[in-house]
Image: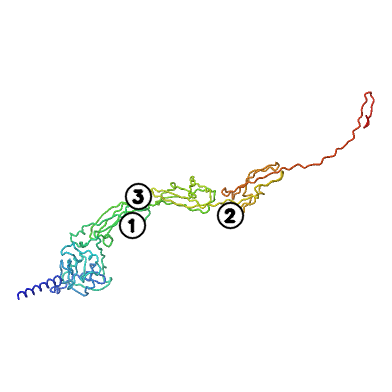
Amino acid sequence: MKKVIKKSMAMIMAVVVLIGMAGVNPVQTQAAESTNYTIKVNLGTNCTTIYNKNGKAVKAMICSPSTETPTGTFYIPEKYRWHEMIGNCYAQYCSRITTGILFHSVWYYTNGDKSSMSVAAYNVMGQKASHGCVRLLCKDAKWIYDHCAVGTKIVIFRGDSSDDPLGRPSFTPIKTGAFTSWDPTDPDPANPYRKAKPTITVNSKTIEYGTKVKLKELVTVMDSTGNEITSKNGKVKISGKINTKKLGKYKVKYTATDQNGNKRIKTVTFRVVDTKKPVIIGAKAKKNVAMGNSLNVKSGVTAKAVSGKNLTSKLKVSVTYKNKKVKVSKGMVTFAKKGTYKITYKVKGANKKVRTKTVKYKVTDQRVQFALKSKTVTIKQGSTFDAYSYVNYVKTYKGVSLKIKNNVTYSGKVDTSKPGTYTIQYTAQNKKKAYTARTATLTVVVEAVEPPTTAPQEPTTTPPEPVTETPTTGESETKTPGEA
């Protein structure tokens, strides 16, 4: 009988212990209502708002209830500094709402060990995550534990954001990769998060010339939970300027403050640099370059650094025709043959970066069409010679007829008074441009003309004139023809 009584007492004690661990305390559920604050839990937005006795919202808290969280009006019946939860885990700053339902911190693996908080459970704050309780950040659970007396009124309802006059606070998860940790919001002075300063990491100390930059984006500012500090979970103050249109060094001061008030100050020296290849301007392909013409391939071509420094004097050029080098003299190139020429420009900047650009010149034969009527002519001695009369035609390379005397010149003379062979050298060109010229040679043969032949004339007999002889004796004697 004594054994049965002892067993029964043991069972009763076990039930009492279990009921106590579950947080049920029927004796304190009838406690008088506290009028200092009213707590309202909006299950529609996972936001808890605290109102003072005048009905004014004074504090908002992000929370994690669940679909099992009851709605209605309740009064805090009791509180627990640490309390066991379902699943052999523990929570801090517990304020009971009703049987089996409490306000409490995120759960811990070890009772009383603040460094054993489940990071995974912490990181789902603001979502439906509990078994019916209303999970809070440690700082918020402690605030209710400290400020809301037993008997404080609790209203749990399903509403929307319009029912949250202060809005739902933002939340910063822990991104360090830790499995367990302290709650970063725990106000305990021993909390390592309260002492850990933010980190300011420079992404790059060099800035490309001419780029648009935001000073905040030049560094990464992280809090001790592994989150980047923004206006929602801290503050980053920046002083200093950077002119990306001017090469040089610039100092920028960063002051980062996390949500716990921890501050880090760092001054960074940035350099605006030009690391890009220079720019070549004006190098263009040409489709109709005249064969035989000489051009300055540097004319109109300039080079500069991206930062604006003139590099034209350092511009080099090379020319190839059918993979063979063509002579370039101070930029001048003679395009002696028809076909495609490659002109390559090259310039090196002060940053050792090299820019090359290759364009093509298509060279065409633009010489005139020109022909003589014959290569050799024969003319008579003493005849008239007109050099232009032996030109058949002269045309542009496209076949447009040109005036012969305006576009053809010749050298050499033909002396038609003297038999012999003469040479006339013709040059035909359009608008007196040398690269349009063609030449031709005419051989002129001047034939001698024989003098005219005359018939022999008959001899004419004239009777002799009478001769008068004077005698020596003083006599005169007259002789007639035929006399002795």
Q: In which quarter of the image is residue 26?
A: bottom left
Residue hosting label 2: 398
Q: Please report whichever mark, 1 or 2, sits nearer to the chain's N-terminal start.
A: 1
Residue at x 54%, y 52% (from the top left corner):
364
Q: Name the secondary structure under disc 3.
A: strand
Side (left or right) of 275 relative to 27: right
Q: What residue type is labelled 1?
A: Lys
Residue 310 x %, y %: 42, 48
Q: What residue type is labelled 2?
A: Lys
The numbered mark at residue 248 is: 3
Side (left or right) of 26 relative to 161: left
Tell me whether the residue at label 1 lies in contact with that at label 3, contact meaning CB atoms closer than 8 angstroms.
Answer: no
Q: Quadrant of residue 141?
A: bottom left
Q: Which of 17 and 248 is in front in this view?
A: 17
Residue 355 x %, y %: 42, 51
Mark 2 vs mark 3: in front? 2
Mark 1 vs mark 2: in front? 2
